Each structure stands twice: as structure tokens, then as C-alpha cells.
Image: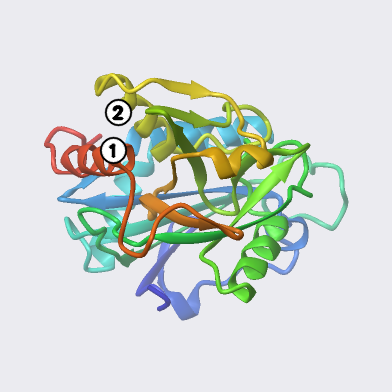
Amino acid sequence: MNNYPKKVYLNGDILDYADAKISVFDRGFLFGDGVYEVMVQTNGHFFYGKEHFDRLSECLKKVYIDFDTTTLPTKIEDLLKASDLSKQDSLIYIQVTRGVAPRKHSFPANTPPTFMMYALPFKLPDINKNNIRITTLPDYRWHRCDIKMTSLLGNVMANDHAAKQATHEAVFIRDGRVTEGSHSNIFFVKDGVVYTHPANEHILNGITRQIVIQLCNELTIEVIERAISKKDIANMDEAFLTGTTTQIAAIQQIDNHILYKDNESGFITQKLQQAFSDLKNKKGLAL
């Protein structure tokens, strides 16, 4: 999935990707002053599309960017059609910045936002069977991780650190407690109880995270939104990551602590993976 898209939707126009240009004075380019969303189309529908659009709208309000998200489904359909991806499994990236203005830290007045989207062919596996190895590091980011913002340097640096350690993901530790991954949420299981960091300003409240909590409730699996301390990681029975493209991925190893041997995972993790797979294949999840 490292290819450029066929088409880009930019400020009302659908262009070949090579022709999609923005101003060097766009605040997204100068400051990372914008928000984004990632969603998938699977089995002919947007998977939890409403929840993704709602989160985008909430993040826009949090950063005071005035942008109407209600027309997005129609515009995405136009983009998918132009990209030859109508009703095909695909990944959709959406980005809105504060727009173009002379460089100044304070927000410009009456500046229209810059709106960009693209889509790529992308098929989710029924179940993510990759067993993930992660590394931990201090959470040096700011205190508004609940905003899905384009200024992701802290996350990018952490993920690059993980890659250089030959691991799949970096997970942050803030004040001695596990928060989230560089581009995922993290869950732990102990004695059949699922634990995850509460949805506050220190994590992004992932859509897949929300689905997993919903599935736990439906399956009568106790879930507690409480952060796990780093020193308690070694006492956990299971751990897994969640995310739009990650889905639910079992964690095999955290730093030097091994949870499973190769190709193994825990009972609760497997149960949630199957329930998530069943949910994807249900009808009626379109907008």
C-alpha cells in the first residue's frame, strides 16, 4: 500500500495525483495546522463511517476549523468512482487544514480551509494474524492527543524508533503508565478482564478501540478503562493493539517481555478478533 493514489480530491476538484498542488503558505504545510481521518470501505460499505465522520467533525471543532462534514459521503463516492474503486475494498484518507494565509502563529480570519482526500485499494484480512512486537518509550508528546491532528512528528519519531529496533510499533509511557501506540490503541488482559487507558486527552479515542469495548460488553467480557503501569506489563496474560488498518493484533513481545511464542495468542484476543471479523461481514453498517 505504498503507491500513490490514482486521483486526489482537492478543494472540490478531482485531479491526477501528480497535478494536486497546495500553496507553500498552507498552514497545514507550515504548522501542521489541520486534522485528518482514515477509514476503510469493506464489503461495499464504509465500515463505521458515521463514527469516523463524527470524530472528524469533533476534531475540527476542537481546533476551531469551520468545515461542513455532512457532504463527505457524496464527495467520497465521487472520488471512489474517479479512482475506479466504487464498491471495492479501499482505504480513504481525509485531511482538512486551516487554509492558506501569510505565516503567523495566531489563526487567520476568514480563511477557507484546504480540503484533500484520496483513496487506495486496500483489503483487510478477515483476522489480523500478525503477532506484534513492540517497544516502549517515554510519551514526550503534548497533552491533546485526543485530537487527530496532522502534526504527527512525535508519533513519527516514535514509530521510526520502533522500526530501528526491528519492532512493529512504539507504545508510549506517560508518568509510568501505558497510554497508546504511535498509531494504535493498546489493550491488556489479566484474569479474563480487559484493561485499556481511558479516553482522555492523553490518547486518541480510536474507532476500533470503541468497537472493541462494545464487543466486550456484548460478549460479557469485563472491560476496565484504567491505565496499566509499565511495571505491571510483565504480569499481564495478553495484550493487543487496535486500529483502523491494524484491526485487532495480538502482541507477542513488549520490550524484552515475551507474552507468546510465535503464531500464538490469548483466548480473549482470539475471541475479540473473531467477533470483530463477524461484525465486518454484517450488512447494514453503511451510512
Q: Image point 43% across, 36% down: which residue?
A: 209
Does residue 46 appear in the picture of this structure? yes
Q: Viewer-nearest of labels 2 and 1?
A: 1
Image coordinates of residue 108 in percent, x first then y, are: 79, 44
Image coordinates of residue 49 in percent, x first then y, are: 33, 39
Residue nearer the viewer, 40 or 287: 40
Amino acid identity at mark 1: Leu
Q: Which coloring applies here? A: rainbow
Q: Are marks 2 and 1 in contact (CB under 8 Å)?
A: yes
Amino acid identity at mark 2: Leu
Circle 1 residues within 10 Å: few <14, some 14–19, many ≥20: some
Q: Which mark is residue 215?
A: 2
Does residue 68 appear in the picture of this structure? no
Residue nearer the viewer, 279 or 134: 134
Q: Horizontally, is 2 left or right of 255 in the view? A: left
Question: Hey, which quadrant is residue 276 in on the image?
Answer: top left
Give me the C-alpha separation between circle 2 and circle 1.
7 Å
Image coordinates of residue 18 in percent, x first then y, are: 48, 80
Q: Which mark is residue 272?
A: 1
Q: Which mark is residue 190?
A: none
Tally of marks: 2
